[in-house]
């Protein structure tokens, strides 16, 4: 224990040293960048010939720099000067700088949108970086908005990037959205999706909506050209059990990447008035089968409570609306913390650690799905997934008997304890509740699960 | 009547993780007509293996499920009263929220 403490303080020290060296480097880089910026801008030194022609010399309004940078866009007969000009005068807001928002922002910045806003309140985390490709390791622990904005500026310093480092709420959504022409929904939860759609209806903004989970993605444009809003399609929110999160169900990184790219495409089409935006239609992407299906969906519903004919849903109603209550799920993506059991049916991770060290005789049942158990597990734990627990109670009985045998040969008196663990301490409570009903009255869950164990007892235990 | 039924957006988990089902259904009423209402109850009885409440609520699909008949929202064809034809493709897809 003592040696691991020394080791961790050594590592901490090294991290600190490296971080300070890194911030020195970053300062130096930004000083050089501003120096370079000065060199490339003629009004500072008057040497740059390419930019010496005044932008107003061209009747269409694109500057020489823009003509060069966006030349491949301008060469497209169906996009051309007109499309680029409209794009450069438009403003797009991307809500969420995650798996969908990352590629959407990269392409929107590169393509030369006039103003690009980013809303998010989260920080960059290593276990999201497989899909949140706008962020780099240097930004782990820092604001996603800051990180995404920095990358966008590196790609295209001529785009105005606006940082909204806050959670989107009914109290700030109207004000933020009103500054933009087009909204891109790149969030990851049901209440945000209803809130964003309603706000777009109230303000009359087109909404490019994307979603991805596992190996599937969905995409459509709402509230555009007589098309439906999110509520026309989904007037009643789904049950919370149907709202899976990437952090629980997993997601292949490239899947939201593809949907996010398509969101950028649709936003570009809407803002440049080019092509046929995906309104009144929905794109369904199945990565495993390598299939994209585009289906026709209903138009605007006259009965829609928000965008319908007799809707009384205006700014005031929006600000009063409780989206968390409506969808029965939280706006923030923080995981659920259930409290199903009495305190005497639970033990803390620290206490379990103590009992383990004291050699207490017990059986530990891990109720996570098998593919979770394969990632990492506590030694000597018995994997019986919650879904199959009712058919496998015999295994619990025989494990307890086996422990009893071992114990009687060592002749101490106490009963064999039964503990249940899962990833975060929700399913373990459900399992204990079930076990107590089925004749295991002393079953206890380990509070906070393996995540708690890694946090509070063993920092070397992997989190996922 | 030969139909292709597809499940997506996680609904396939309710039917042994099989996404595409080629099925043959005989309309019960003898007139040879099969409507979506009949199909839903057939699916619930014959394909849904667990948590039926994740597929249906009352006599229709639960909120958050889109039903597409030949790539077209069933709202446009009469919802539960949509008449099915030989070789139709019916897709049930749960809306996703992740990102
Ligand atoms: Zn509507």
Image (cartoon, rainbow, N blue to C red):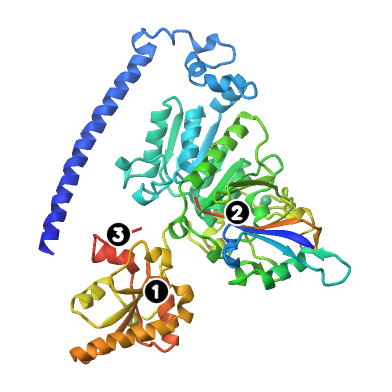
Q: Residue at x 40, y 64 (%)?
A: A372
Q: Residue at x 37, y 15 (%)?
A: A40
Number of the front mark, 2 or 3: 3
Q: Residue at x 43, y 83 (%)?
A: A393
Which mark is first along the chain, 1 or 2? Answer: 2
The chain ID associated with circle 1 is: A
Q: Residues within 10 Å of mark 2 (few under 14, many from 20)?
A: few
Q: Quadrant of the C terminus of chain A?
A: bottom left
Q: Is residue A181 visible?
A: no
Residue corresponding to mark 3 = A462
> Would you say the residues marked 2 and 1 are in contact, meaning their CB atoms lie under 8 Å apart?
no
Same-subunit check for callouts 3 and 1: yes
The secondary element bearing badge 3 is classed as loop
Residue corresponding to mark 1 = A428
Residue corresponding to mark 2 = A317
Tell me the CA gap for discs 2 and 3.
46 Å
A144 up-or-down from B81: above or below: above
Q: Residue at x 57, y 37 (%)?
A: A182
In the shown orientation, is residue B30 left or right of residue A62? right
Q: Nearer the viewer, residue A172 or A345?
A: A345
Tell me the CA gap for discs 2 and 1.
40 Å
The secondary element bearing badge 1 is classed as helix
């Amino acid at each position: 224990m003592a040696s691991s403490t020394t080791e961790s303080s050594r590592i901490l020290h090294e991290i600190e040293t490296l971080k300070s060296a890194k911030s020195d480097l970053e300062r130096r880089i930004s000083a050089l960048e501003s120096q370079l910026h000065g060199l490339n801008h003629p009004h500072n030194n008057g040497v740059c010939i390419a930019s010496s022609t005044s932008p107003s010399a061209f009747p269409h309004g694109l500057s020489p720099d823009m003509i060069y940078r966006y030349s491949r866009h301008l060469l497209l007969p169906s996009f051309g000067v007109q499309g680029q000009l409209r794009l450069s005068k438009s403003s797009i807001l991307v809500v969420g700088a995650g798996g969908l928002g990352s590629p959407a922002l990269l392409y929107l910045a590169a393509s030369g949108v006039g103003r690009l806003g980013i809303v998010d309140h989260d920080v960059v985390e290593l276990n999201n970086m497989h899909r949140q490709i706008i962020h780099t390791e240097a930004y782990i622990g820092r604001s996603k908005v800051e990180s995404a904005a920095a990358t966008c500026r590196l790609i295209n310093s001529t785009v105005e990037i606006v940082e909204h480092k806050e959670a989107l709420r009914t109290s700030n959504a109207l004000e933020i959205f009103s500054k933009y022409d087009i909204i891109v929904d790149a969030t990851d939860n049901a209440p945000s999706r209803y809130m964003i759609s309603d706000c777009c209806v109230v303000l009359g903004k087109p909404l490019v909506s994307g979603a991805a989970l596992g190996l599937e993605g969905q995409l459509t444009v709402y509230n555009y050209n007589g098309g439906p809003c999110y509520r026309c399609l989904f007037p009643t929110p789904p049950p919370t059990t149907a709202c899976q999160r990437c952090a629980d169900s997993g997601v292949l990184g490239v899947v939201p990447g593809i949907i996010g790219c398509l969101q950028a495409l649709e936003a570009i089409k809407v803002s440049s008035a080019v092509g046929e935006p995906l309104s009144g239609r929905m794109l369904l992407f199945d990565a495993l089968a390598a299939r994209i299906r585009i289906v026709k969906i209903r138009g605007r519903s006259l009965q829609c409570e928000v965008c319908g004919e007799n809707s009384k849903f205006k700014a005031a109603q929006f600000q009063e609306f409780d989206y968390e209550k409506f969808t029965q799920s939280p706006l923030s993506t923080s995981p659920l913390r259930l409290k199903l059991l009495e305190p005497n049916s639970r033990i803390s991770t620290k206490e379990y650690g103590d009992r383990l060290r004291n050699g207490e005789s017990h059986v530990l049942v891990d109720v996570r799905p098998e593919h979770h158990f394969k990632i990492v597990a506590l030694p000597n734990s018995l994997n019986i997934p919650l879904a199959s627990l009712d058919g496998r109670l015999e295994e619990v009985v025989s494990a307890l008997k086996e422990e009893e045998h071992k114990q009687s040969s060592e002749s101490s008196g106490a009963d064999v304890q039964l503990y249940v663990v899962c990833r975060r301490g929700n399913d373990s409570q459900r399992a204990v509740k079930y076990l107590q009903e089925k004749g295991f009255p002393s079953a206890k869950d380990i509070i906070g699960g393996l995540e708690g164990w890694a946090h509070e007892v063993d920092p070397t235990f992997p989190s996922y | 009547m030969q139909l292709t039924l597809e499940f997506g957006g996680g609904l396939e988990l309710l039917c042994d993780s099989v996404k595409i089902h080629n099925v043959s259904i005989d309309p019960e009423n003898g007139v040879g007509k099969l409507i979506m209402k009949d199909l839903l109850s057939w699916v619930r009885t014959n394909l849904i293996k667990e948590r039926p409440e994740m597929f249906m609520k009352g006599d229709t699909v639960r909120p958050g499920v889109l039903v597409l008949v030949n790539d077209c929202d069933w709202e446009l064809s009469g919802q539960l009263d949509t008449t099915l034809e030989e070789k139709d493709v019916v897709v049930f897809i749960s809306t996703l929220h992740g990102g």
